[in-house]
Image: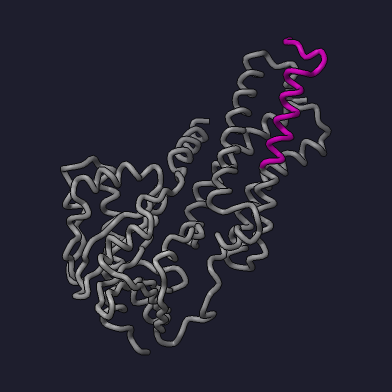
Amino acid sequence: MNGMLRVAAATLLLHITPVVVLIKRPAAVQALLPGANAYFQRDLHLSDRDAHRLHEVVDWSPENDVLTFYLGRTGTTDVGSLEFVRVDTPHGPIEVAVGFTTAGAIRDVLVTKATVEMKPWIQEAVGAGLLRSYAGLQASQAPAGAAAVTGKTGALATYVAAEVDKGVQRALTAYSLFYRSGATRS
Amino acid sequence: MLYDLRRAIPQVKWLITCLLATFGLAYLFGSLMVALYAGFTPARVAATYAGPAMTMPMPPETTVTVERPMQMEEFAQPEVHAVDTDLLVQDTHVHVPMYGLLAAALSLIVLGLPLSRGAGMGLVTLLFSAPWLDFAGMWLTKFASPHFAIVTLAGGYAMGIAYLVVSVLAVHRMWFSRSGGTP
């Protein structure tokens, strides 16, 4: 009986709450591609070799092995690009939007979706400066959002910051391996 | 009969009534959540679990880039809530034990109803088969054919119907059955 109660309690604790939109996509696009007046969707259908390479580096495979970037232009001038990346956590998914400058550095990061449960943790981490820690990050650098908010927030906000780090790392790696450098030829 | 709800003491009857009401509230909001995230038609369920139609049926030999212009309005279009394999693994892991506990609790109530052996077995089977159908449908939709979305819908409706049948029979037996007094 005691075991059954523990299973029931664990099940209740692990129940995933619904996903809520924190920032709508048009608002995220305008924030991460400032001034753009023309938009393009670039889908990179990864070969098996490239998909494997990405998985080896960041332990992640995009859905259907397709990476999608959104590009912004003002006239003929590139503004930059952005990618939406989902991170699955034991508390449900979060979505991170990562914007890049034309030089390949991170312009800004936004958390666009989270579960009801994680929303306050995200807000606490963002309030402690989580997103500011990513600005200017290059492909050779590792995101350190969790380290940036440690000591300024509770344990759950620090935990979720580490999950945002994962999303930023995935976007950064995908960008540097395939968007910027060009895909490998097999 | 192992026990009879009609002869249960009022505290037990009240406990079961409160449990059924609580489950009912949970099922009501569960169905609202399904309406928000997956929908009640085979097409919407298939879109949720099977994902968008693949533009390339096989992985290309080299990575292929496809670019198209788009309008800002396209970013505002409602997104299809897609459940990929990782999320489905997670959903199955956390939902199936909970559904099992719900089915077990409702089955215990069924044991206190004056049903024939066949009807009792059938109702218990329905209670437990509903989550099996629900999740089997999701996995089959993802990996076999989008047509299996109907199995998930059948599971969802079976869950609701089984709950309603148990609730109606139990409430009738406890509160409205003749000679339904306390022992």
Residue A74 image offset from top left, x and y in percent: 27, 74
| Residue reaching furthest to the bottom | A186
Q: Is residue A161 left or right of residue B131?
A: left
Q: Is residue A1 visible?
A: yes
Q: Is residue B103 left or right of residue A25?
A: right
Residue plotted at (41% across, 72% down):
B70
The magenta segment is: B160-183
Magenta part, dominant SS? helix
Residue B154 image offset from top left, x and y in percent: 69, 51
Nearest to the observer: residue B113 or residue B36:
B36
Residue B82 image offset from top left, x and y in percent: 50, 60
Q: Is residue B83 visible?
A: no
Whether residue B48 is in magenta: the answer is no
Residue A144, image quadrant: bottom left
Nearest to the observer: residue B66 or residue B83:
B66
Nearest to the observer: residue A20 or residue A64:
A20
Query: Is A176 placed above or below A83 here?
Result: below
Query: Is B75 placed above or below A111 here?
Result: below
Residue B98 image offset from top left, x and y in percent: 54, 41
